[in-house]
Image (cartoon, helix red, strand yellow):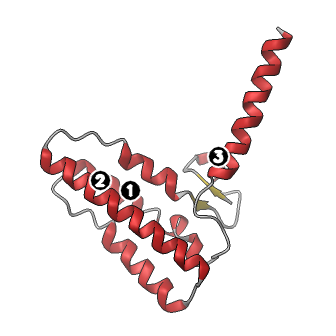
Amino acid sequence: MICDDAPQFKGILEFLGLCLIHEERHYKKLTPSHPDFIKAVADFRETFWKYYEKLKLYKINPNDKKKKELSDEFDLIFLGKTCYFALNQLMEKTRAKKDELLLVLEFPTIPLHNNTSELAMREKVIQEKSEDILEA
């Protein structure tokens, strides 16, 4: 199962992967005002998405060499050594979730994100709310 970092899913499944798109949203929420910090966040997010593209390619042609390279690259990306303290803290939190975020390296057939599932659930919730309004 791939999900966001919601606590209700932890401990109930043998393998729980975290959604990379949800993880990146934390970085999108950063609001630095100093130009150096703004650049640090922009550079990091660009690196994040380039890495995401590499994971997509890995899914097409998984192999042990690439698996090791991607695992090592994750460690370098999320080392947390920028000029922006808030970014560094967030990177450390992400690094702590490495196993869950990179479950795709063990199981290349799983999705990298759960947006498809979320959209399906969101449509069901909207439908139920509409029915509740009509009944009221």
Q: Which numbered marker is on residue 104? A: none
How would you rate the neighbour count of disc 2 (Cα within 10 Å): few for under 14, some for 14-19, many for 20 or more? some
How would you rate the neighbour count of disc 1 (Cα within 10 Å): few for under 14, some for 14-19, many for 20 or more? some
Query: Looking at the rendering, in which quadrant would you find the N terminus?
Result: bottom right
* Discs 2, 1 touching: Cβ within 8 Å: yes
In three-dimensional space, the C-alpha distance between marks 2 and 1, rounded to whole angstroms, equals 6 Å
Is 124 above or below relative to 115?
A: above
Is 65 above or below relative to 96?
A: below
> Which residue is at the far top?
136
In three-dimensional space, the C-alpha distance between marks 1 and 3, rounded to whole angstroms, equals 19 Å
How would you rate the neighbour count of disc 3 (Cα within 10 Å): few for under 14, some for 14-19, many for 20 or more? few
Whether residue 94 is visible here, answered yes or no, is yes
Q: Which kind of residue does numbered mark 2 sit on?
A: Gln
Residue 70 position within the rendered picture, expressed as x and y whole percent measured from the top left: 44, 79
Q: Which kind of residue does numbered mark 1 sit on?
A: Lys
Q: Camera-side residue: 86 or 61? A: 61
Residue topped by disc 3: 8
* Discs 1, 3 touching: Cβ within 8 Å: no
Q: Reading the chain from its start, which is encountered first: label 1 or label 3?
A: 3
User: What residue do we see at 86% from left, 12% from top?
Assistant: 135
Residue topped by disc 1: 93
Residue topped by disc 2: 89
